[in-house]
Amino acid sequence: MTKAPVLKNDCFALPPGVHWTPVDEALSMLRERLHCIVPAQETPLADLAGRILAKDVVAERAHPPLPNSAVDGYGFHGALAPGEHRLPLVKGRAAAGGPFDGKVPAGNAIRVLTGAPLPDGVTTIALQEDVSVEDGDIHLRGPLKEGANARSAGEDMQVGQSILPKGRRITPADIGTMASVGVAAASAYRKLRVAIISTGDELVPPDVQAKDGQIFDANRPMLSALIRAWGFEVIDFGIQPDNAEQVQRTLSDAATAADVILTSGGASAGDEDHVSAALNSTGSMALWRVAIKPGRPLALGIWNGTPVFGLPGNPVAAFVCTLVFGRPAMLQMAGASFQNPTGMMVPAAFEKAKKNGRREYLRARLGKAGAEVFPSEGSGRISGLTWANGLVELPDEAVDVTHGTLVKYIPFSEFGI
Ligand code: AMP
Ligand code: MG
């Protein structure tokens, strides 16, 4: 395993005098200052799905390795001119896994099955549906181009060719691509270990009877599900009360066990905001007031060498901030290339006069007339996240959205969920 360098204590520091940081600026700061913090390890193919490549993957063999037939049919040399043709059949056949060893003389044909290496002397295959066999000859009509229905060696991938880049998260398709060129293992980063902590005296897990004044902890199960969907490992540090010492003790335990710590709640600058208080005591704390709705300040800092993302407690804000900031930041720390969703411009099926000064993310889904948004923007309405299939991203500037205005829609799938 190769060791990964640690992050510096001041990696989240903000330029002096900054009050509201635009989303793009916040993202470029994360991009510039974070780097991969997990070691690489040689990983067998069976364990590579969802993992991030630490090195380019190179084809160990050409694909296909030999020229071969794309169809069941009859092979011969060269092209066929327009009109009727009759070619004598050579004895034997070429099949996948059962090649024909002899040579097929020019003007003769041979039975060939899909995937069979082309026999010596064969460059072209006629589909069996287009051929009739009579008295040891085949009859067929031209024209047929030389090379028809044949695949050439290496036409898909050549030996030594780089087929997957470092930083890519391996998909099921990639597994097939690697296997087809004989790659049985690759160097991948160890899964990022993410500690998840909920904070708040009011919180109880959803499997207990809640008393008056208590609310169910929605963030920890939700964030855990996000983290797993992104291919990282969750280490659950439960619900922590609004108690400075206990929050600090938990941060220390989490810093030992995990590569990154995600907390929710207690991230502002109030009396019971113990995550930001704890980070403040380390001198590494930066309270990022990002110009984003829904959002609250993000408390970013380093606890015992481990980066901490202090998310707002409000579940909708926690969710959106994790998609917009947490995901690219964690992907970068996990060794992946920084990724921002592209989104697509679609007509709005809603109206909204948006003020200047902060970016807004609306819970949205695509309908026949375009992007619809959840009727309430209330950030307490978590059911809107379930209603939605994605987010509409409205720019930092003022916009007057009416029906048909093009707006940016980002499907949740672009966030990897
Ligand atoms: P805080 O950021 O701690 O001030 O919390 C802001 C709001 O989010 C409060 O109404 C909290 O009760 C609520 N909240 C905090 N953490 C969670 C959680 N894990 N699940 C659901 N709601 C929460
Ligand atoms: Mg709280």
Image (cartoon, rainbow, N blue to C red):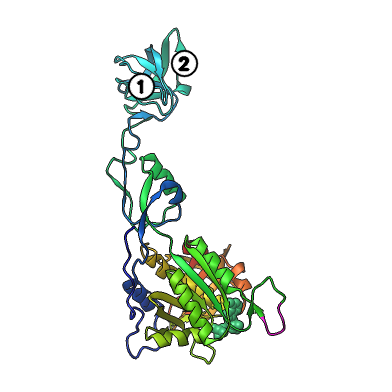
Query: Magenta residues, as a range?
Result: 210-214
Figure disc tally: 2
Q: Is residue 245 above or below residue 337?
A: below
Quarter of the image where one finds residue 21: bottom left
What x and y, as percent, mark residue 183? 36, 43
Between 114 and 371, the one lying in front of the other is 114
Lower sequence index among marks 1 and 2: 1
Residue type of the residue flagged with mark 2: Ser
Side of 377 relative to 31 (left or right):
right
* Residue 368 falls within the magenta-colored stretch: no
Task: Estimate the x, y position of residue 73 in percent, counting from the top left.
Answer: 43, 22
Please name the residue that numbered disc 2 is placed on. 132
Q: Position of residue 176 (x, y in %)?
A: 43, 44
The residue shown at (41%, 11%) is 137
**In the image, farthest residue toward the top:** 135
Q: Name the main secondary structure of what is drawn in magenta.
A: loop
Residue 82: numbered disc: 1
Say if 243 sits above or below 44 in the image. below
Secondary structure type for disc 2: strand
- Residue sitting at the far left: 160
